[in-house]
Image (cartoon, grey):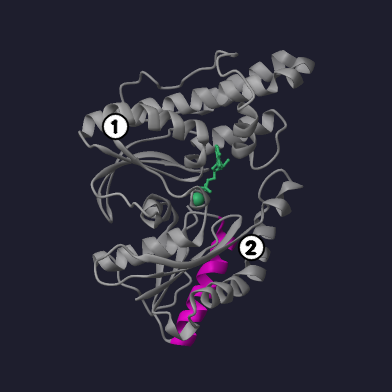
Amino acid sequence: MLVLGIESSCDETGIALVRADGAGVPVLLSHALHSQIEMHQAYGGVVPELASRDHIRRVLPLTQQVLDEAGQTLADVDVVAYTRGPGLAGALLVGAGVACALGAALGKPVLGVHHLEGHLLSPFLSADPPEFPFVALLVSGGHTQLMRVDGVGRYEILGETIDDAAGEAFDKSAKLMGLGYPGGPALSRLAEQGDPAAFKLPRPLLHSGNLDFSFAGLKTAVMTQAKKLGDGLEPRKADLAASTQAAIVEVLLKKSITALQRTGLRRLVVAGGVGANKALRSQLNAVCAKAGIRVHYPELHLCTDNGAMIAMAGAMRLQSGLQQATRAYAFDVKPR
Ligand code: KG4
Ligand code: ZN
């Protein structure tokens, strides 16, 4: 079974082709990505209308590229999977519209995939995929969740953010420091030159006793600190970036360890854009190695949005029998 995946929920157009044979882990044949980051940079954030227009420009050439690289044609595709949500409505409609149009023209069924399930299952694209069950730390620009994962579609939320997501905390703090968009990677690069203990920043809900997160207060503390520094911010920027990153990473780390202890599970999967963060990876690796816990990440280039994770999640859902592909071709998207 060949599954074509289309991701267009935000500012990346991602297309991929996976092959799923029997019950084995599906194999990625090819994938292509076009990032709109440069286009949105001038505005300091994603402009939804521009995002939709650019997806329209990119989606078919990228699809052709992916098919060519895999030595396949559209006629070989068995199912078209697309991101149904969450995301920007207009951007999602491009992926859904193209998926349904291809499906209708080829007489092949389509499948709407949850964007976060794509992130969650993206470590299955790596050479050493995880085994169920595991604890998942899902950290993206819009979501921060700890989950118990017993199989495809068998997810129990153990805790989540009550306000900002971890990626948002990175992005908003970076913006306050004038680091531009997207803030997470910029802040973490600058943090490498700073002292993580330079500023005392709050670790919200660290001792709350539950597995929920809160990052809004941290952002406010960073803003207060930046204002206090005033003109003195510039020479202390790396220190403030390092201190901000240290606060976010410490909370993510401690809560993940607590989730592992409470569930008794010995495997952790980290997925979503913030999973690319070097400090988070190295600290998790060190703590988990000591405790005898395996940590799985998606490959670095598959941490942020991409089509491979959508093709993979679609293929795994079909294999599990959880969801049937449909010939209804409704352009159903779910932005929220
Ligand atoms: O998963 P993703 O690509 O999109 C969503 O589904 O939201 O995540 C994007 C988020 C952004 O907030 C971005 O700043 C953050 O991931 N991010 C990082 C890093 N790379 C991406 N945050 C910290 N360190 C990074 N290296
Ligand atoms: Zn995402």
In the displayed structure, 228 sits above or below 141; it is: above
> Is residue 164 something one can see in this rendering?
no
User: Which label number is shown at residue 165?
Assistant: none
User: Which label number is shown at residue 259?
Assistant: 1
Secondary structure mostly seen in magenta is helix
Between discs 2 and 1, the one toward the N terminus: 2
Residue assigned mark 2? 52
SS type, badge 1: helix
* Labels 2 and 1 touching (C-beta < 8 A): no
Query: Magenta part of the protein: which range?
Result: 88-106
Identity of the residue drawn at 43% across and 49% down: 298
Quarter of the image for residue 144 reads top left
Q: Does the magenta stretch include residue 99?
A: yes
Quarter of the image for residue 50 reads bottom right
Crowd tier of the residue under label 2, counting other residues whose Cα lies within 10 Å: few below 14, some 14–19, many 20 or above:
many
Identity of the residue drawn at 53% across and 38% down: 167
Q: Position of residue 36 (x, y in %)?
A: 66, 56
Q: Does the magenta stretch include residue 274?
A: no
- Three-letter code for the amino acid on which mark 2 is drawn: Ser
Q: Position of residue 192 (x, y in %)?
A: 61, 27
